[in-house]
Image (tube, rainbow, N blue to C red):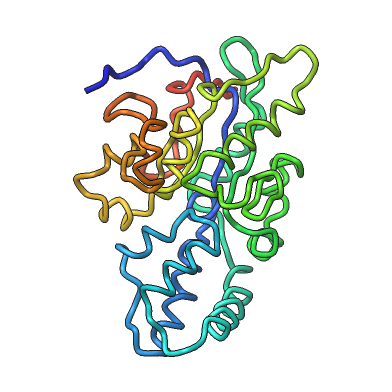
Amino acid sequence: MSLRRTDFPPVRACLFDMDGLLLDSEDKYTICTNAILAKYGRGTLPWSVKAQLQGRPGPTSSAILWEWAQLPISWEQYQSELISLQKEHFPTCKPLPGVEKLLGDLTVARTGKGEKVHIALATSSTATNFKLKIAHLEELFSVFVGHRRVLGDDERVPKGKGKPAPDIYLVALQTINASLEPGEEEITPEECLVFEDSVPGVEAGRRAGMRVAWVPHPELHKEYDGRQREVLAGRTGEGGPEDMHQLGEIDDGWADYMQSLEDFPYEKYGIIVE
């Protein structure tokens, strides 16, 4: 067992997932999926399968669901029905508890040395779905300036390298470092805090060499009962055995579980909000 690290530098960059972390959009995905499953007599989506879908790029999660559901329709019809339902439900997405205060606080946050705390978005949502989800929430998302929004179909992320691969978070950090103010030192991965709700997303953050705050849906947390320490280490095998060397160790101090984003412990991460 590794020694738990406690001597981290202050966090200078906060990198955010979106679905199920900032917005209740994961619940909308479930509503859409269950509508199709019910229509064709396939019951409801269990969390054992839902957990495999979360955080991954759309094509990957759709393929996993398609293989599991064994629907009596063509892939094209399934996609058509799913998109139609998403167009109906995504515009009703709402911020999750604590999100508005946290993002507002971070816009004025500093480290103990007076350094600015930067933020970026790293979501597997495509540009089309992103717009559907946030069109009525532009003011909230205005804290993420355009070039610091890294989406699921962003050309800056290599194809086939979505979560649980680390690339989307490394690209998000690059967008910040490329736009620092004169005199600001480049931010390193260990100065970053990744906010994630999904298990593949936690692994992506850990493989990027960053600290992680895991804020899962209560049912997801229950699904991994007894394995939460593996999740925090990124050691649930989401990226395959060949990448295990990139991961953390159990109880190494790099990741923490949080029930919600309310009452965020800024001091723990060396962040000062006045």
Q: Is residue 167 left or right of residue 197?
A: right
Image quarter (top left, top right, bottom left or bottom right) of the C terminus = top right
User: Which residue is found at the position 57% from the left and 32% from the top?
Assistant: 14
Residue most extreme to the right:
182
Image quarter (top left, top right, bottom left or bottom right) of the N terminus = top left
User: Which residue is found at the position 56% from the left and 86% from the top?
Assistant: 77
Residue most extreme to the front:
242
- Residue 209 in the image: state x and y as whole percent: 48, 28
| Above or below, 203 relative to 107 | below
User: Which residue is found at the position 65% from the left and 29% from the top?
Assistant: 118
Rendered image quadrant of residue 40: bottom left
Rendered image quadrant of residue 103: top right
Q: Report the front residue among 266 and 21.
A: 21
- Residue 201 in the image: state x and y as whole percent: 46, 45
Q: How many marks?
A: 0
Residue most extreme to the left:
226
- Residue 269 in the image: state x and y as whole percent: 47, 22
User: Which residue is found at the position 37% from the left and 78% from the top?
Assistant: 69
| Above or below, 17 relative to 171 | below
Q: Report the front residue among 87 and 170.
A: 170
| Above or below, 57 relative to 113 | below
- Residue 135 in the image: state x and y as whole percent: 71, 61
